[in-house]
Amino acid sequence: MQELNVVGKSVRRKDALDKVLGKSQYSGDIKLPGMLHVKVLRSPVAHALLKNIDCRAAESLPGVHAVLTAKDIPESNTHGIIIKDEPVLVMDKIRKIGDPLVVVAAETEEIALRALSLIEVEFEELPAVFDPEEAMKPEAPKVHDGGNIQSIRKIRKGDIEAAFAHADIVVETSYRTQMQEHAYIEPEAGVAYLDGDVVVLRVSTQNPHFDCKEVARNLALPLNKVRIVQAPTGGGFGGKLDISVQIYIALLAIRAKRPVRLVYTREESMLASTKRHPYVIKYKTAADKNGKLMAIDVIVIGDTGAYASYGPGTLTRSAVHATGPYEVPNVRVDAYTVYTNNPTAGACRGFGVPQLAFAHEQQMDMVAQRAGISPIQVRLLNALRPNSQTGTGQVLETGVGFVETIEVAQAKALEVLGRIC
Amino acid sequence: MKKRGVGIGCMWYGIGNTGLPNPAGAFVDWKDDATVSLMVGAADIGQGSNTVLAQIVAEELGVGYEDVLVTSADTGVTPDGGATSASRQTYISGNAAHLAAQEAKKVVLEEAKEMFGVEKNQVIIRDRRVFVKGQEENYKSLEEVIGGCRRKGKMTIGHGWFNPDTTGLDGETGAGSPYDTYAFATQIVEVEVDTETGQVEVLQIIAAHDVGRAINPLQVEGQIEGGSTMGLGLALYEEVKVLDGKIKTPSFATYLIPTSMDVPTMHPLIVEEPAESGPFGAKGVGEPALIPTSAAIANAVFNAVGIRITELPITPEKVLDQLAENQ
């Protein structure tokens, strides 16, 4: 490859000095004159009809500047990265523990917290569903009106039945993967203030232009009157793609006519942020006696919790990647995105592929064992190479370095472990 | 008894959103003194996109890395870069920044062509010097050439945007070309399983990643090490426990992530099979780094003690249960 002057060199990161010297101003470090502090009241129940919220005592507490509920959202009161199915503040139905009900801006965090404790919420609990396979049944409590199966992504290639009928080796296994927290070092945070008639936000985010659209839509503002400036951000891993503090602080800065800041505690971050989708994977592999893959038949059920977030995108990516980096002539995948009353799952580093890799890589080892070849051999035998066709029928002409990664890793294993697998 | 095992995990990962448009834009302003302002929507969340994008622009313009100042992720001044997700910013915003730099460079090359009286393709810009191919000693400074542009009223600015060439997936068959390029990886891990306690310790991780082109090799290695560590957490420790919708592990006292004590010896290995459509061949690495780790660990546990753990995380309880069942 061509030797270049700057590309390919390990130059010092642009942010290195500020970070090691502690100069970076994260959202939670920003203090603005007259700044108010924001807290969010959240639902303690997983599924309920919201009957009434009484904010009068909170509003009359000295030091409280604004107490807002769903009826204070100028327009839409929805957000969502793929489907706008999540309320900014719940209007009528609670779908998970942690659903936001009221936001308060006050002189101090302590006053804001005291105000929250004075708010009276009436709700009528509904039967809830916490298991995605239960949720798929027609009689299950409905999280959203459209039913709990939010979407299905299908992949169909070749003739599955014929391949399994002729296979020498069939490996069938069920896998389960867990809910994972992103665990970024910095919880969600942001400040908002007015600059003339532009509301400016400095926030911890992975998705500033999306944030801008969601804030503008809910506040009924033109896009150029909302300015999102990403503050130095202490990690995201997919968990800061969705809306967190943005709409609350923009709305409160306008209503209170004062700069505001909202910093989630770690517990609130855990409660309110998205998670990695827990998966149920039913994976069936067919191969000939030499270990050459003939077919896969896969069902994936992803629990997206109360709201879709990146759910359909995650399950779609899982479906496409279900073959692993291998040539598989016959493919059937059904990937379900399912609503439950669990915490919302969304984007999380790997986006549905780590779950599938956990399955297809164990399948490959089991195929190898049955075929009497090594784990490396079964992978080389089936590897995607230049001009291979994927499960979706795409021909990968160039840029396929898979075999080289196997060879390089194998050589290193021999060197440092004295063996390969 | 402690038993060691070795396992392999492989992965592929399509760069960018799946079968959907997901463009990114960039603006370049090449200033009188040859320093550069680069404005990109891409949010740097610690993964290092500001650094990598500056490198791409510096390479194209023949200036130093330090000459490029990046303003990123400010909707008031930067074009939309899309989300920092899908391992897409080096590839997509990288291409946008590259195109923006090329547009600004065209103006400077045009001016140099006239100054030197040669064809544009004979002009080279390197280390802030402009010269004709083969006549490096007879150079003009970049400031001088940009000054020439200014005297004619020409600005040296550029914009660029890039959207990967994909097709949507068919609703019934899923057929389509959902990504323009894919990253690949193989990880081999060594584990030690304590058959008395069920504890799995990862001793070494070998992680070979095809990143197309490592724009910044140290950052790529950092991503591989960080991602593998997150994959280790997914494999062995991390689980948000939920009972009736309530999170029972709401803090780091109960939600366990790997600490530095849990991080094994790492061997990050960079493989460069260029993406034709990538900036200088680059793909992405942010997510691929964690994808195969839990699979490799599960296979290594089987190799060590002959049990298949099919539910994550691989806790000591599950290992002991399986060992007992195998007896």
Image (cartoon, rainbow, N blue to C red):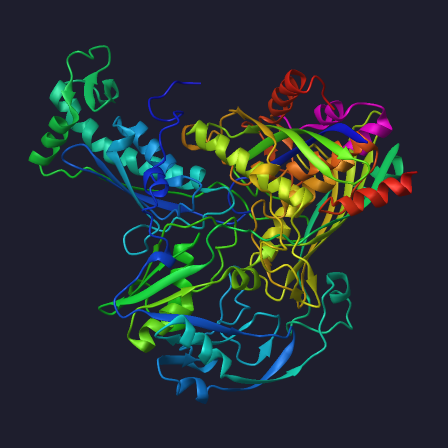
From what the image shows, is residue A71 above or below residue B273? below
Can residue A322 be seen here? The reply is no
Please state the extent of the stretch shown in magenta in the rendering: A364-385
Q: Residue at x 63, y 48 (%)?
A: A352
Residue A385 location in percent, x, y? 63, 26
Q: Is A148 displayed left or right of A6 in the figure?
A: right
* Residue plotted at (52% across, 47% down): B17
Residue A252, image x and y in percent?
A: 36, 73
* Horizontal and vertical percent position of residue A207: 43, 54
Q: Which quadrant is the C terminus of chain B positioned in? A: top right
With B189 as the anchor, is B325 left or right in this view?
right
Residue at 38 percent of width and 61 percent of height: A190
Q: Is residue B32 left or right of residue A101?
A: left
Q: Quadrant of the N terminus of chain B?
A: top right
Quarter residue B118 falls in? top left
Q: Nearer the viewer, residue A84 or B320?
A: B320
Q: Nearer the viewer, residue A388 or A92?
A: A92
Q: Main secondary structure of the magenta part?
A: helix
Q: In terms of image quadrants, where is residue B207?
A: top right
In the image, residue B196 lies in the stretch drawn in magenta: no
From the viewer's side, name the closer residue of B161 and A266. A266
Q: Is residue B29 above or below residue A245?
A: above
Residue A209 percent location from the top left of the image: 39, 56
Please tell me whether residue B229 is drawn above or below residue A73 in the rendered image: above
The answer to whether residue B109 shows anywhere in this view is yes
Task: Name the residue rendered at 61%, 32% in the picture.
Answer: B264
Q: Residue furthest right?
A: B327
Which of these two is toward me, A245 or A395? A245
Q: Is residue B226 left or right of residue B9?
A: left
